[in-house]
Amino acid sequence: MKKYKEVSIDSTTQQMYERAREMGIETVWERLEKQQPQCGYGLLGVCCRNCMMGPCRINPFGGEPRRGVCGADADTIVARNLLRMIAAGAAAHSDHGRHVALTLLIAAEMAEKFKKEGKPVLELDNMASSTLPYQVRDVEKLKAVAERLGIETEGKTIRELAKEVAEVALHDFGKQDEEALAFLKAYLNPKTYEVFEKAAEKAGMPWFENGILPRGIDREIVESLHRTHIGTDHDPVSILLHGLKTSLGDAWGGSLIATELQDILFGTPQVIKAEANLGVLKEDYVNIVVHGHEPVLSEKIVEAAQDPELIELAQKLGAKGINVVGMCCTGLEVLMRHGIPIAGNFLQQEMAIVTGAVEAMVVDVQCIMPATVDVARCFHTKIIDTSPLATFPGAIHIKFDERRADEIAKEIVKTAVENFPNRSKQRVEIPKEKMAGYVGFSVEAILKHFGGSLKPLEEAIVEGKIKGVAGLVGCNNPKIKQDHNHIKIANELMKRDVLLIGTGCWATAAMKYGIFLPEYADTENVGPGLREFAKEWGIPPALNMGSCVDCTRMLVLADLIARDLNVPISALPVVGSAPEAMTEKAVSIGTYFVASGITTHLGIIPPVLGGPKVVKILTQDLYDIVGAAFIVEPDPYKAAKLMYDHIMKKRKELGI
Ligand code: SF4
Ligand code: MSK
């Protein structure tokens, strides 16, 4: 068993981990320990289960067997496995995006139907009617997205525009022509577009029509499965090129659609102060943790928790009120838009339950451990699963339907409230620590803050006050002490005057340690140039840009800078990092960062080391193909140095 200080640098996690051990509750760290030693073939990526002649394993030391039963060698197997990881990650993000597009469409169609039924026309045309489960909260953004997509906006109602935008988005999922995605074409600067177009030719594979430009979001994911079927694609170069293409379908397709359409439906984030860490749970309140990824659900839970009848019920049952807090990315969505506090990142999901103070953990999709149900059994906590595509044995199933969103959200909140009397007061222990921070740095909020353009930021970069920008993303992974690498890399980069932007569990980690407070710029962890810039503009030295799908906000920001400088994204002094990566989605994000021209560091070694050609392509050859590549370095200090060196190299190339 691990000592509490070994599992996390977060004192709240340490406290709850100790508590779980005292209570004999198994957590992620014990389960990881029971898995030791983990399979060496799996870690190197040289195990294949793609057909029933296998499973096959390649001897990583050069002896026999050198090939699988079909003849596939280590590089083919490693590349295929990696492509399947990218495809799964892209599928998760993109299915999320599809869900949001369908929600926008459903809302627009309901408005049309209600209008025909004689309900107030103006409200419905503006999609502002409270009879609709989902409204258009950001009309300006809807118009801006429509204009980018080339949709005529003059003389159209909001309802008509919403419908058209949703239809263009949905078309990008299933279209069958060879053209690049409509969203990609609408958002990407021509110089980067050209890089995508020519990438395959540069890699010696001119038969890739239109290079690595994704044609259909679903199509690239399906093709990934096809290519990796036994007896299909065996060249690591073509397999990985398709990996880039699939990930770009995620970046400039599925994830981008998720972010942009969520902003339309729920509002574009603006700068707001909020709090993070387990200390946001309240002893006297009904605590509801929303966990997962899709704000289509969590937005409605936040609304339902404000229902006077439900608050009254909570009070009748002895609570002071209802406290909704977030976990993982759905938490970040409501944090960014409403300042709803976030209780923690990936490795704190079990810890939140161990407080004994959670009435319900309401889950949707992705990054939710099935073990939450087992931990919840030790307390009164109810796990409520809500997505038709994610069912947890032992949980309560209240499946969500957008058409009846309000009714279902109220049912979920009521279930939580009615569980309050089952809480055992003696078994409650909520860690005290929480930290404030400023969040809500959407691209629009950043532009607004800088007076309508990115010039101040660009000038600071050119002057050298800021050396460059690093996009930090991704998960926790119990193989690394929770948050340790997130914070070390962040500090090492900020010390070198690198401005940070970030999302996902990295962003929650950063917030927990005060990095999103403007006064953090006064600490020794921030260099003089970045300090001066942050103080001049009244911003923290690191900006929270949202959830995992909001990594696209970082791409859009990089793209705007690239446009202003008339260069492809790959020319910018910009780097990415996923210090504690865990999910297949993180693999897709890392790949699309690189494919888009942003050299990206991974702090966890992905299962590729068994394929020397694959390693060379990923860490070297991609520089010639897309102008960026992967840096793999588990040591956070060395990693930060390598990332900084890359930024300085790019500065030199730009002549600044
Ligand atoms: Fe083995 Fe080839 Fe089948 Fe993979 S595809 S399991 S390497 S025979
Ligand atoms: S929640 S993908 S653990 S960042 Fe998006 Fe966190 Fe990684 Fe899930």
Image: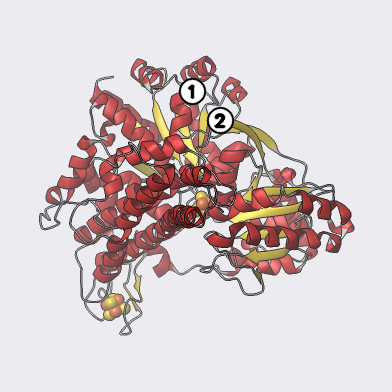
Q: Which residue is mark 1?
A: 449
Give, as a three-letter code, the residue at label 1.
Answer: His
Residue 402, placed above or below residue 53: above
Q: Position of residue 554 (x, y in %)?
A: 41, 38
Residue 527 is left or right of residue 28, and the answer is: left
User: In this orientation, does residue 448 appear?
Assistant: yes
Give, as a three-letter code, the residue at label 2.
Answer: Val
Q: Position of residue 410 (x, y in %)?
A: 69, 58
Q: Which mark is residue 271?
A: 2
Judging from the image, what secondary structure is the residue with disc 1 in?
helix
Look at 36% across and 15% down and name the residue there: 463
The image's colour scheme reads: secondary structure
Q: Is mark 1 within 8 Å of ligand 2?
A: no
Q: Nearer the viewer, residue 465 or 634?
A: 465
Residue 37 is left or right of residue 90, and the answer is: right
- Graded by Cα atoms within 10 Å as few (under 14), some (14 to 19) or many (20 or more), the crowding at tag 2 reads many
